[in-house]
Amino acid sequence: MKLYITSFSITLLTLLNYFAQAQEKINIVASASMWADMVENIAEDKATIDRIVPIGGDPHTYEPTPSDAIKVSNADLILVNGLTFEGWINDLIQNSGTSAETILVTKYVTPISSDDYENAADPHAWMDANNGRLYAKAIYEALVKFDPENGVFYTKNYEAYDKDLVDLDKYIKEEVAKIPSDKRILVTSHDAFKYYGKAYGIRLEAIQGISTEAEAQLSDMTRVTEVIKQTNIPAIFVESTINPKMLQQIAKDNNIAIGGELFADSLGKKNSEGGTYISMLRHNTDVIVKALSTSQFTETAEVKSTNNLYLYLVLGIGLLVIMALAFTKLIK
Ligand SMILES: [Zn+2]
């Protein structure tokens, strides 16, 4: 009997300890999947992390649900991009009555101003890996401020993650350099790649502007078609959060390829390609470089034409020999 009571007490203590530890975790809510992944890398099991816009959802046009309000009201920290990326977030935070601190993950970023709207900034700053480092810095500082007891743990993770982002930046630069310079033109669904283009030297053309709220016009299709004709690019690209119909039509009309699917405003599914911030930028780069580097096709064509030349030469010589032999027989 005594043994039962002791083991029951131990189980109870373990359970209580488990709940105490679970309660100690920081509750973090991220507006979108990119910074949900960043904070996961730095906080690991010290936090429970939730995001509002689901994978594959469009944060520009997202409509918050009552369960989002509950998530936000229970949070300790809320990570938002700002720069009008999630136009609905301020209302959601205010209406939830939360006492959480809102962390602007773009606080260290120098924004690119928008071509479409006056006095507005382009929100897609994370598409430049060096900006990703600034996002990680803002997140790391917020974690240390909120939970200084685990400061050493966060610092270690942050430094390792920052190193990975430096490597990522280097990787993208090296890969993009493989695209012939006159083919470094990226045509996509919406204008989410300006930071990427500025950092890595690619010209951008998109059907929709920096937000997907305004619908594409016929004039947008004409403008993009004109660019395709002038530049003779081999491929254009669809995005995971946007209906690909219009781009598929343009590709068909101009007889060019869809180079692949890019991730801009959402990560890919967990444990799949593009499922983390780092693999998202790697995936985009791999897809873009492969589709825009036509050198491999040119090379194949050159090899083929050289092979054909040899064939004609051999045939020609063979014919000459036969003719010479026939001529010698005739004379005899
Ligand atoms: Zn966007």
Image: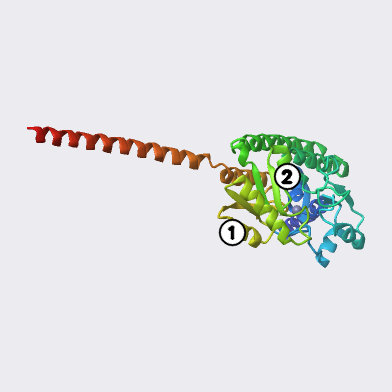
- Local crowd size for mark 2, using a 10 Å CA cut-off: few (<14), some (14–19), many (≥20): many
> What residue is shown with label 2?
127
The quarter of the rendered structure image containing the N terminus is bottom right
Q: Of the residues shown, which amino acid type is indicated by label 2?
A: Met
> What residue is shown with label 1?
253
Element at label 1: helix
Task: Tell me if 285 is positioned left or right of 73 in this view.
Answer: left
The circle on residue 63 is none
Q: Which residue reaches farthest left?
A: 332
Calculate the distance from the C-alpha at mark 2 to the C-alpha at mark 1: 29 Å
Task: Tell me if 291 is positioned left or right of 77 in this view.
Answer: left
| Residue 50 visible, this orientation | yes
Residue 275 location in percent, x, y? 66, 51
- Local crowd size for mark 1, using a 10 Å CA cut-off: few (<14), some (14–19), many (≥20): few
Give the residue displayed 57% in from the left and 47% down from the top: 234
Give the residue displayed 67% in from the left and 62% down from the top: 243
Residue 128 location in percent, x, y? 73, 41
Mark 2–mark 1 contact, CB under 8 Å? no
Residue 84 location in percent, x, y? 84, 53
Vertical arrangement, residue 252 with respect to residue 288, above or below: below
Residue 150 location in percent, x, y? 82, 40
